[in-house]
Image: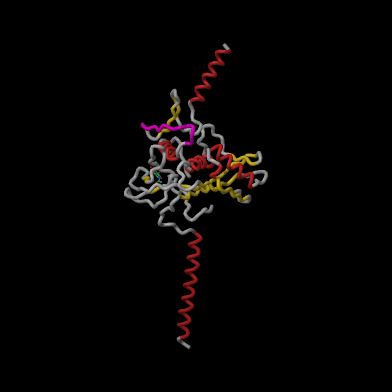
């Protein structure tokens, strides 16, 4: 009897471990050989490779589908360079190429269209269906992470090693792409620059950022739900927020860069000085005509 139970357990464990997808908790896996798919719409399922991170374009489509059917929802510091930008639009229903890359033009199922980079983030103004878009690669992502309180202050050098290890283990990101890690102890701010050589088309940086935003702001996309933690000198550091800037090989084409508060204040002060100057000038001329 014991042998039978043992055999049963072995078979059970074997079947379940063979057919699941740790890189994607929303995946449906079944069959022999094991096949994993992501659901995008009622009849359509995208086959996926669970040995890798799933392309962001597929994940966004699946997320839109899940939001539509109430399965889940999502809501979504300083620029590294002037051309860097953040994702203010949040999620839309993207058009993906066969391998899971974003099409350069996206319309969210409407007549309003815009251009996106390889990370699927809008890099142009919105226009109509005739808008011209070229594929543009995001070669640099600038991550601003805020870590939770820690008992002992972190050592910046050890922190860099910890970040590199965490990104490699969790998101399979080669350490050579982590170009810089800066640390502000008082603000609990960790700034990580992940860069690949321009023209490199093998690594997709958007994979990592999408998984990472989910890990930190929402819930991990990984089946095992293990949180994202950075190990620094044996202690685990977890993150409470993340902001991602994207830098593309070609600068984005937004026309209306809205003036920020600081610029508006400067404009107001300059205008006041000019007006005051004019008043002085006018009154000087006016009074001098009486002398
Ligand atoms: C895309 O469309 C959905 C509704 O279908 C809307 O909630 C969402 O805000 C749109 N996203 C963008 C970026 O326009």
- Picture coordinates of residue 61, whole percent (x, y): 41, 38
Could you say where residue 49 lies in the image, as x and y percent from the top left? Answer: 45, 32
In the rendering, at what x and y percent does residue 9 appear?
54, 18
Residue drawn at the location 59% of the way across and 50% of the way down: 182
Quarter containing ligand 1? top left
Q: Which residue is rendered at x = 50% and y = 22% of the image? A: 15
Q: Is residue 127 left or right of residue 31?
A: left
Q: How is the image coloured?
A: secondary structure
Location of residue 127 with respect to 169 vertically, above or below: below
In the depicted structure, whether residue 110 falls above or below residue 29: below
Observer-nearest of 228 and 33: 33
For this orientation, the residue located farthest to the right is 152
Classify the position of the N terminus by image quarter: top right
**Residue 115 sits inside the magenta stretch:** no
Camera-side residue of 280 and 129: 129
Residue sitting farthest toward the top: 1
Q: Main secondary structure of the magenta part?
A: loop
State the residue lying farthest toward the bottom.
291
Q: Where does the magenta region start and end? A: 43-53
Lateral position of residue 134 relative to residue 205, left or right: left
Residue 47: x percent and y percent?
41, 31
How many numbered markers are drawn?
0
Asked if the stretch drawn in magenta spans residue 44, the answer is yes
């Amino acid at each position: 009897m014991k042998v039978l139970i043992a055999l049963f357990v072995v078979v059970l464990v074997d079947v379940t471990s063979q057919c699941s997808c740790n890189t994607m908790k929303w995946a449906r896996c079944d069959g022999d050989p094991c096949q994993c798919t992501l659901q995008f719409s009622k009849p359509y399922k995208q086959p996926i490779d669970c040995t890798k991170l799933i392309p962001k374009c597929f994940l966004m489509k699946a997320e839109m589908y899940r939001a539509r059917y109430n399965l889940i929802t999502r809501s979504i510091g300083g620029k590294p360079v002037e051309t860097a930008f953040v994702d203010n639009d949040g999620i839309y229903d993207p058009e993906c190429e066969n391998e899971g890359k974003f099409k350069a033009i996206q319309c969210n199922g409407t007549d309003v269209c815009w251009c996106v980079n390889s990370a699927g983030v809008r890099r142009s103004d919105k226009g109509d269906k005739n808008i011209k878009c070229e594929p543009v690669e995001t070669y640099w992502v600038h991550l601003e992470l805020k870590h939770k309180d820690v008992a002992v202050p972190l050592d910046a050098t050890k922190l860099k090693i910890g970040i590199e290890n965490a990104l490699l283990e969790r998101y399979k990101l080669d350490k050579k792409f982590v170009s810089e890690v800066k640390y502000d102890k008082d603000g609990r701010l960790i700034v990580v620059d992940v860069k690949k050589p321009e023209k490199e088309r093998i690594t997709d940086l958007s994979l990592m950022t999408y998984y990472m935003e989910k890990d930190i702001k929402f819930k991990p996309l990984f089946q095992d739900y293990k949180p994202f933690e950075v190990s620094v000198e044996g202690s685990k550091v977890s993150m409470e927020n993340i902001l991602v800037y994207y830098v593309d090989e070609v600068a984005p084409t937004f026309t209306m860069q809205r003036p920020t508060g600081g610029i508006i204040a400067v404009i107001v002060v300059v205008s006041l000085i000019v007006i005051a100057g004019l008043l002085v000038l006018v009154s000087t001329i006016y009074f001098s005509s009486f002398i």
